[in-house]
Amino acid sequence: MKLHRLLIPAALLGAAAFVTGCGGVSVPPLYQPAVAAAPVHVTWVIATPAMLGSDEKPAYLPGNPVLPANTDVTVTVVNFDDATVLPAGTETFATPTGIVGGLSVAPMDPANPNADTPAKTVASLDPATGVSHTFTVAKLNLNVPIAPKSRTTFTFHTGAAGTYAWQCMDPCGTDPAGWGGAMAATGYMKGTLTIA
Ligand SMILES: [Cu+2]
């Protein structure tokens, strides 16, 4: 009699655990939902030197982003900075590569940055007046021109895990050619993209 009373609760517990997966009991495959990577949308900022209290270095925030692997990631870059002319021979960086679909650009007034402004989808930007910075990952064939004082939105498929160097290819820094200062500083106009 005593044994009987002990056995019944144990059997009930076992049955409940089988269905719910509670209590550390593994759930049969039948009960596991299909795993599909949900799309991810992140927002980055490009801050001006004045915003950062710096004399001349604009920066991507974050400077060393981390994104999930094998995922369609949509990135909106809120850019407070103005344009830098893409030098002759580098105009190609005004055209995105490695993204899914087009580049969406909405003008943004830095004095009223949350105003709802309509976005336009474009195939490329004007290399003379329409590019402020780029987010370029050579190893992933990813190049995204970022419009000045705007919200630029793009989507790309992250693929396999790894760490990848990224660099702005629009010489927005110091030195006569513009490749000093922020362009040469990790965490400003270059850094590491981690796909994890
Ligand atoms: Cu730049």
Image (cartoon, rainbow, N blue to C red):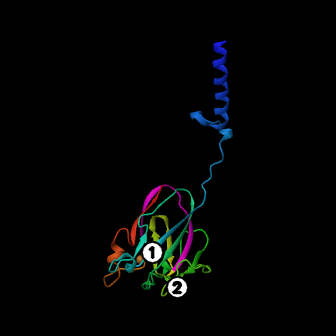
Of helix, strand and loop, which mostly describes the magenta segment? strand
Q: Quadrant of residue 178?
A: bottom left
Q: Which mark is residue 126?
A: 2
Q: Nearer the viewer, residue 192 or 106?
A: 106
Q: Residue at x 66, y 32 (%)?
A: 16
Are the two marked residues, 2 and 1, in contact with CB atoms closer than 8 angstroms? no
Relative horizontal placement of residue 158, taking residue 172 as reference (left or right)? right
Q: Nearer the viewer, residue 158 or 119?
A: 119
Q: Is residue 20 above or below residue 135?
A: above
Q: Residue at x 47, y 72 (%)?
A: 45
Amino acid tagged 1? Ile
Structural distance between the alpha carbons of marks 2 and 1? 19 Å
In the displayed image of the protein, which residue is found farthest to the bottom?
128
**In the image, residue 80 lies in the stretch drawn in magenta:** no
Amino acid tagged 2? Asp
The residue at which mark 1 appears reads as 46
- Measuring from the top left, give residue 98's x and y in whole percent: 54, 68
Count of numbered tags: 2
In the displayed image of the protein, which residue is found farthest to the top?
1
- Measuring from the top left, give residue 140's x and y in whole percent: 49, 64
Mark 1 vs ligand 1: CB under 8 Å?
yes
Identify the mark nearer the N-term, 2 or 1. 1
- Measuring from the top left, give residue 143's x and y in whole percent: 49, 72
The segment highlighted magenta reads: 150-168
**SS at circle 2:** loop
